[in-house]
Image: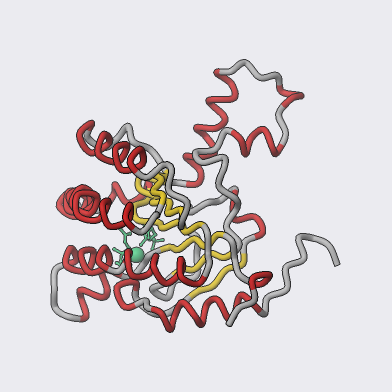
Amino acid sequence: MSGPQHLPLHVAIIMDGNGRWAKKRGLPRLAGHKAGGENIRPVAKVFSDCGVRYLSLYAFSTENWNRPEMEVAGLLTLLSKKIDQETRAFHEQNTRLLHLGRQDRMSRRLSKKVQAAVELTKDNTGLTLCLAFDYGGRDEIVQAARRIADAGIRAEDIDEPLLARHLYLPDIPDPDLIIRTGGESRLSNFLLWQAAYSELYFSPVLWPDFGRQDIEQALSEYEHRQRRFGRI
Ligand code: IPE
Ligand code: IPE
Ligand code: MG
């Protein structure tokens, strides 16, 4: 088992491979997204049981709007359904839900639903789960720059802590470990600022199949990493 000193405080996951999972089974891509969605609560439970405090999940990128209209619509519907079906259960597990990303390009109705789930769970003291939906790392930095300019902050007063305070979720620590499922080895615009010193772990397992054993393997590899942050 991981000793607490080697346990990541914050794990972020790029949940990739839903489409290929469906294709392998001769199913439509949306069936893969549905299966992927069903994997969220069990995975969150495993991390929470291990003692991880923050879990961020990449569900929809700013670039994913470029997918066929039907898939985008399906993903938005899935988000809405998931909130309806799962918020209560997360709340009962003492999970605090947060949204990471933009809400101005989803319907007002969906945005209100997202905000209601965040509001309902805001005082929970267990796992903090940040769902990244319509999230892009570059977009987040651009929005931060805009807010800084709007606030009339002088150039010489801008430093790294100030910029970090203008990101979407300034109170969430940087991820210690970023896991990408589905076999690709890239960040695809996830947490670009916050990933500066994250450990990266790439798993070939497709997201709907990513389970307890895969999580334990990732945590045990993390345990053996030596983080230097530029020091020796
Ligand atoms: C990840 O699965 C989920 C989203 C990006 C919405 P994909 O849909 O990218 O699955 P693959 O990469 O096509 O298998
Ligand atoms: C990354 O997956 C985004 C999410 C998992 C939400 P993509 O499937 O969109 O990434 P690329 O296009 O392969 O880089
Ligand atoms: Mg993909």
Q: Position of residue 20 (x, y in %)?
A: 27, 74
| Residue 46 percent location from the top left of the image | 42, 72
Q: Who's the residue at 48% across and 54% down the image?
A: 190
The answer to whether 222 is drawn above or below residue 146 in the figure is: below
Residue 61 left/right relative to 81? right
On the rendering, which quadrant does ligand 1 occupy? Answer: bottom left
Quarter of the image that includes the N terminus: bottom right
Q: Position of residue 39 (x, y in %)?
A: 30, 69
Closest to the observer, 52 or 195: 52
Question: Residue 6, relative to residue 76: is it above or below?
Answer: below
For the image, the number of numbered tags is: 0
Quarter of the picture containing the C terminus is bottom right
Q: Is 185 placed left or right of 28 in the picture? A: right
Residue that protrudes farthest toward the right in the picture: 232
Q: Quadrant of residue 184?
A: bottom left
| Residue ranking furthest to the top | 152
Q: Name the residue: 64% across, 55% down.
A: 196
**Is residue 86 shown left or right of residue 58?**
left
Across and down, in percent, residue 128 comes to: 46, 53
Residue at the spot 20% in from the left edge and 73% down from the top edge: 22
